[in-house]
Amino acid sequence: MTVSDHDSVISTKDLGEELAKISLDLAKRDNASYAELRLVNTRSEAISVVNENPASEEASTIGVGIRVLYKDLGWGFADTDELEHDSIRETTKKALALSRGASKLGIKVNRASEPVHVDKWATPVKKDPFRVPTETKYELLQDTTKRMKENDVVARRGQMTFDFIEKYFANSEGSKIFQTLSYAGVSAIVAAKGPTGVQRRSVQQNTGGGYELVDEMDLPRQAVEITKDVLALTHAPTINEGKSDIILSGDQVALQVHESCGHPIELDRVLGYEANFAGRSFLQPDQLGKLQYGSEHVNIVMDATLDHGNGLGTFGYDDEGVKAQRKYAVKNGMFVGYLMSRETAPRVGESRSNGCMRAEYYKLPIIRMTNVSLEPGDWDYDEMIEDTRDGYLMATNYGWSIDQKRYNFQFNTEKGYRIKNGTIGEMVRGPTYAGITPEFWNSCDAIANRKSWVLWGTPNCGKGQPGQTMITGHGASPSRFRNIRVFGAS
Amino acid sequence: MSQKMEQQPIPLRERAHQIFASAKSVAGKAEAEIILVSRIDEYLRFGNNELAQSQYSTSRNLSVRVASEKKQGRVTTGTLDKASVERTVEKALSQARDSPEDPDFLPMPGPQKYRSVNRYSEKTVEAPAELKAGYIGSAIDLAKKNRLLASGVLGTSVEQVMMLNTSGLEASYRGSGGYFSLTMDADNGNQTGYALSTFGDIGELDPNKVSQTALERAQMNKNQADIAPGKFDVVVDPYAWSEMLLFFAVSASTGYSPDLGMRQYKEGRSYLSGRLGEKILGDSISIDDDVYHPSQAGPPFDGEGCQKSKVSLVENGVFRNVVSSRISQHRYGAAPTGHELPLPNPLGELPTNLVIRGKGATKTSEELVGELDKGLLITRFWYVRETEPRTKTVTGMTRDGTFLVENGEIKRPVKNLRFNQSLLELFNKVDALSEPVRNFSEFQQFRILQPGILARDFNFTSVSPF
């Protein structure tokens, strides 16, 4: 099933074909060595309730992004939301003018080849969110925030978001690809004040698909649990600074993968193109196949295919027309691969991009994470707890920070528990852990099995200048790390 | 390329009135408000001494709010033809019908008077890409001569806003601005220096100064010495803060929602709830929200079109006021200050133009370094996040040049450090300040004027390998 009832008077695919012909013909006549056009038609909905106050917003955008390469020396990009033929010609000319200017300060671009694709692809959706009445959504969110209402609770919030994107891509090599992409996000957050200050508990998930995520999340039930948690946290002790074994919840491992593996394997930052803002990377090309990034238990894949799951990094083709693929970044602990583009892949001896260029239509595509996931291990979660003599269980991220080369990190989590002799004990507030990336991943000695593995979503990954926000997926299950520096957040 | 909007076939004001007429006719008896925003951005982005990513972007965005019987809906679209506008208003009407009553609903405000601001620079709008590429070419040449790699961005933007509602309100704004952000580095970022300049008028930009600053810092910042973490007196360059001081105004504990508004304060959501009149910062520190400051940017009206007032939030260290709105006036009898976000807004009011300043005479960054007996000069903070809301403790890293200072002189670079530091404590230990400057980061979109400081006992907790 695909989502229907979109606004288009003319189909996005037909309009894309019409506009691509105008733009690509013009670029060819003006001696562009390569050109591509994306027409993107997006419909979004965000509904939230904070305490007693409702808010909703629906948004639709449609526009074209055109990227051209001049004499294989300079890129230019221009976008417009005016879709008349003259505007498309004008926008193509602007991209061409920028590419000619850039060619004077550019170096030779060698792009990896990619087969020509004429195809279509759609995110599987079980329940079209735009057909669910607004009243139904509000009723659920009001029920959620109502169940959080307790003495000492100071903020209650429930939210759901839905995106439906039609994307037509064509390039001067003959590829013509039409995709419909659907994403859903659901979250609840509760904050309470008590003797330990303000504490927070939250639940959040973002995936590909539709309203079925809301049904699966059952926010009203989870609202009761996190409210009970947050009130307990306002009286919970903190933890002493020291070294300890830790078990991280799956959602926390997902963010750890995002920050300490997903970003340093972006090849554009490795090559210096992000040095001024997002930063560089400690994972250099001469370490491919040589650096023991993690322990033998650690396997991290870059997988945009649907076989991996319906995540925020799942699609048919990336934004330069490269088909979705699965590759290892870390295999048995060894660093073996990067997230790449057609332009950067040859710089590390690869003959083909693994399809990681993504952006909104009005931004120039850059290398972004797809689904960068830690593969499940062979531990039953309960056995992992039972096997831990002395340590902490830490769950759900509160704050995160990592240096620009992705070495030195510190994450604090919303709640934790002491583990003693294989049993989960006292709750602790603001448990925090810190370390150096390769040392940390080499201390991983247990990863929970597929029963505990979830493909989590990160809906707000920032990178690029001007800033771009991208959605990324991260599969993970609870994992154990030995002898890690821990302390309390306050 | 010119970013002049007058080249558009229909001026924005005329277009806004055409759209509003359509919206009103579809809305019928319901109240209606439109906000029409038009932007043109040009960014020349470079990396590895190449002009790698140049882009020219035009966009229009129409946001429609309708309200009836205490219910409201908001729908936005980028498509402005008559049929699309009518469909957008119909959707907003449908959304309002299906929404619960908003307990804070108020009829839309009528005509307002606005204090004028002049934020539009013909020079910026007309600046050709060739001029900007020339600035970048000079930076790249300088980097190459010194065996360094230049990367960064030079961007300019022009924005025009029109707001109309069925109570007769009409507000308009146009502004331009930009920034030049530059890193020069070598040895995979082990040697690096950074500089930034923001401007409203591109004539204010001194590209050579930006290039020279990045170069000088990169030349100094190599072979960094080991350093043990601990408490250090510091000089923080005013451009170093770009990701940090927004945490005075937002909290992670409530999902990155704003803190310094009346509704959050009264509901107990703010980290400062119950602390008005309390001394929270040092005697020398004051914080205003002041959209009219000559170095500030943005429109003089809020998300429902009310005029913004200057508000003294912290005066000589004492927490004096929070920002307010018509809703807070209705709820609590507070005088509105024009700090509402576009409605419906369940989060509360937001100060949008913070100015953090010191009392008395200010000093240059060089003078602040000259007064530091022993400590660290910080040129850039990175990846700052809140760890504890009550004390506003944040963690983050230094990058692109952290220098040991002894007897008022820079002695040597040191490795990057992680900190865990309470902002409230830090701003209680400030000995001297420089003039505030307008900072910018892709992470922090707030408009905050921030000073450099000389402060005691900054808490560094670990060290990076580089």
Image: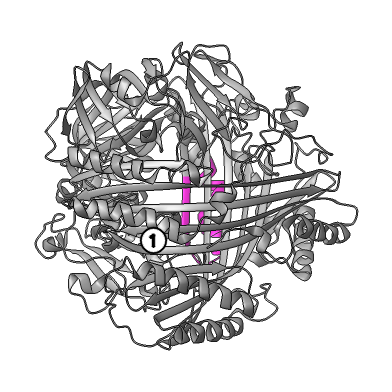
Q: Is residue B159 above or below residue B324?
A: below
**Location of residue A401 in the rendering, given as x and y in whole percent from the top left corner:** 32, 41
Q: State how the image is colored.
A: one colour
**In the image, A205: left or right of B366?**
right
Front residue of A379/B241: it is B241
- Among the 4 quarters of the image, the one containing residue A69: bottom left
**Location of residue B245 in the rendering, given as x and y in whole percent from the top left corner:** 44, 31
Residue at 52% x, 81% y: name it. A23
Does residue A210 show up magenta in the picture? yes
**Location of residue A309 in the rendering, given as x and y in whole percent from the top left corner:** 39, 68
Magenta part of the chain: A203-223
- Among the 4 quarters of the image, the one containing residue A113: bottom left
**Location of residue A226 in the rendering, given as x and y in whole percent from the top left corner:** 48, 39
Residue B105, visible in the rendered structure: yes
Does residue B248 show up magenta in the picture? no
Front residue of A328/B310: it is B310
Residue at 85% x, 48% y: name it. B166
Q: In this view, does B135 lie above or below B201?
A: below
SS class of the residue under badge 1? Answer: strand
Q: Residue furthest right?
A: B29
Amino acid at the residue labelled 1: Gly
Q: Is residue A54 above or below residue B309?
A: below
Name the residue beneath numbered marker 1: A473
